[in-house]
Image (tube, rainbow, N blue to C red):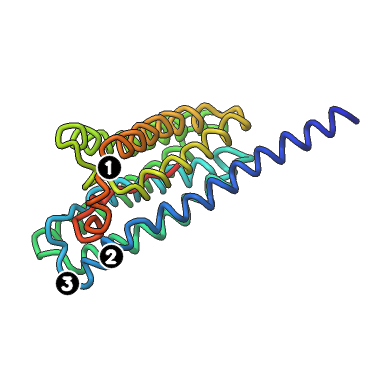
Amino acid sequence: MLSTELSSVYQSFCDGAGVLGNIFAFGLYLSPLSTFNRIIRNRSTEQFSGMPYIYGLLNCLICCWYGMPIVKNGIILVATVNSVGTVFQLVYLSIFISYAERALKMKMLALLIAVFVLFVSIVVVSLSLFDYNGRQLFVGYLSIASLIFMYGSPLIVINLVIKTKSVEFMPFNLSFATFLVSFSFTAYGVFKMDPFLYMPNGIGTMLALVQLVLYCRYKNPSEEDAVEEEEEPLLATHP
């Protein structure tokens, strides 16, 4: 009886971490709205880059596939959060492409097609060449690489903050949402005893924590009201 109760409590904590990760991720996906409102208002992508959303789309697709029962059973919450992320990335990319100049528009469209071709190739290879266990390893290692790459992308911003001693290009909401999401899925991965979840998300948690510490260190109160008028980097990370 005690063992059953402990198992039930363990499962509750596990599911709770996954559900919180989904909720926090929704806030993370909404964080670039001010940037895209600016793009729509000015009818121009200006100096913004759409590449992080290309990377974000590929990451969401790979992680969504990893969370499918046919690849890894019991982590459907990974699939749900990344399926929602896929929709957001596609919406953001559609807006970006709509207002980009012709040369950039064609480049982004080509990259978008390349992402889908690569993802379809991953799905076909994982289904045709691997059994259930091999499929977990194949897609799992790809998801680790994808997540580490996504979580590592803010290192450029961290370096800029340290050099300039300014958090102008490191929005607090984005850093805080990234910390909450990565921490939740680190816990979810630990509960599920899945290194393909807790290892990359653990790295993401540490990097997001570094960003928050730097924000506290270099935040200038006088910039608080002006920060919304500045260009914000197009960064998006998710599990």
Residue at 26% over, 55% down:
112
Residue at 48% over, 47% down:
64
Dot 2 falls on a residue whose secondary structure is: helix
Q: Nearer the viewer, mark 3 or mark 2?
A: 3
Q: What percent of the width, then of the height, locates residue 188?
A: 58, 36
Determine if residue 114 is in view: no
Residue at 39% over, 41% down:
122
Q: In the image, is residue 45 above or below residue 139?
A: below
Q: CA distance from mark 1 to mark 2?
A: 33 Å
Q: CA distance from mark 3 to mark 1?
A: 31 Å
Tell me which label, 3 or 1, sits earlier in the chain: 3
Q: Nearer the viewer, mark 1 or mark 2?
A: 1
Badge 2 is on which residue?
94
Q: In the image, is residue 139 above or below residue 91?
A: above
Dot 1 falls on a residue whose secondary structure is: loop
Residue at 28% over, 38% down:
154
Foreground residue, 138 or 239?
239
Foreground residue, 64 or 47?
47
| Mark 3: amino acid | Arg
Q: What percent of the width, then of the height, locates residue 36?
A: 27, 64
Badge 3 is on which residue?
43
Q: What percent of the width, then of the height, locates residue 170?
A: 27, 45
Foreground residue, 64 or 130?
64
Determine if residue 85 is in view: yes
State the quadrant of the N terminus.
Answer: top right
| Mark 2: amino acid | Ser
